Image (tube, rainbow, N blue to C red):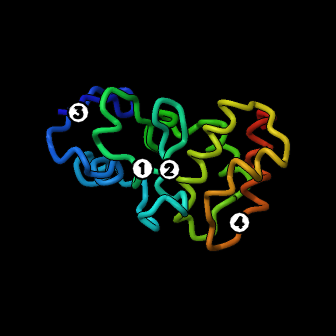
């Protein structure tokens, strides 16, 4: 049995301990904001926070999530007003939008650790989150705006 917190709510999981956290979130809890991308942890689409750290949920087994706190895009802010979410909307970051929840979750984890990151730190932190549409300049602009409290 894996007991964990998901977006502040106590949850219990009594299934296969090797099941990826991604599938628990999507299939068991119907939290479909966390997307499936590559399935091998290389694209960043499935990024969530595990005890405040950005992780690829497709690579975290339920046994590893036991006793920990998970935050998904649905739980980042109750009214979707996290500074990163606001900046994303204000700047109009998404094109197709598929990668954006993973991008937002990774950016929020970065800003929680480094409230005023340099451009080089933003580039390094976001390097594992891929965007097929090439929205990287707007992603960086939104992170800079969120860091400034815009």
Which residue position is annotated with label 4? Answer: 135
Q: Are marks 4 and 2 in contact (CB under 8 Å)?
A: no
* Helix, strand or loop under label 3: strand
Please tell me in which quadrant of the rendered image residue 3 appears.
Answer: top left
Q: CA distance from mark 4 to mark 2?
A: 17 Å
Residue 2's label in the rendered image is 3
Residue beneath the point at 18% across and 48% down: 16
Q: CA distance from mark 4 to mark 3?
A: 37 Å
Badge nearest the viewer, 4 or 3: 3
Q: Quadrant of the C terminus?
A: top right
Q: Is residue 113 above or below residue 108?
A: above
Q: Are marks 1 and 2 in contact (CB under 8 Å)?
A: yes
Which residue position is annotated with label 1? Answer: 57
Please tell me in which quadrant of the rendered image residue 11 appears.
Answer: top left
Q: Is tag 3's residue or tag 1's residue first in the polypeptide sequence?
A: 3
* Helix, strand or loop under label 1: helix
Q: CA distance from mark 2 to mark 3?
A: 20 Å
Q: Is tag 4's residue or tag 3's residue first in the polypeptide sequence?
A: 3
Which residue position is annotated with label 2? Answer: 47
Q: CA distance from mark 1 to mark 2?
A: 6 Å
Apparent side of residue 127 relative to residue 35 in the rendered image (left or right): right
Q: Is tag 4's residue or tag 2's residue first in the polypeptide sequence?
A: 2
């Amino acid at each position: 049995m894996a007991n964990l917190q998901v977006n502040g709510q106590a949850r219990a999981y009594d299934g296969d301990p090797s099941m990826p956290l991604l599938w628990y979130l999507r299939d068991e809890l119907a939290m479909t904001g966390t997307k499936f991308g590559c399935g091998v942890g290389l694209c960043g689409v499935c990024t969530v926070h595990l005890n405040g750290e950005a992780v690829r949920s497709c690579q975290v087994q339920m046994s590893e999530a036991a006793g920990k706190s998970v935050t998904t895009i649905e739980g980042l802010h109750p009214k979707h007003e996290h500074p990163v979410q606001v900046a994303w909307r204000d700047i109009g970051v998404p094109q197709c939008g598929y990668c954006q929840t993973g991008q937002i979750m990774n950016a929020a984890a970065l800003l929680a650790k480094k409230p005023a990151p340099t451009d080089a730190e933003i580039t390094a932190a976001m390097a594992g989150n891929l965007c097929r549409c090439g929205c990287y300049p707007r992603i960086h602009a939104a992170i800079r705006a969120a860091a400034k409290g815009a």
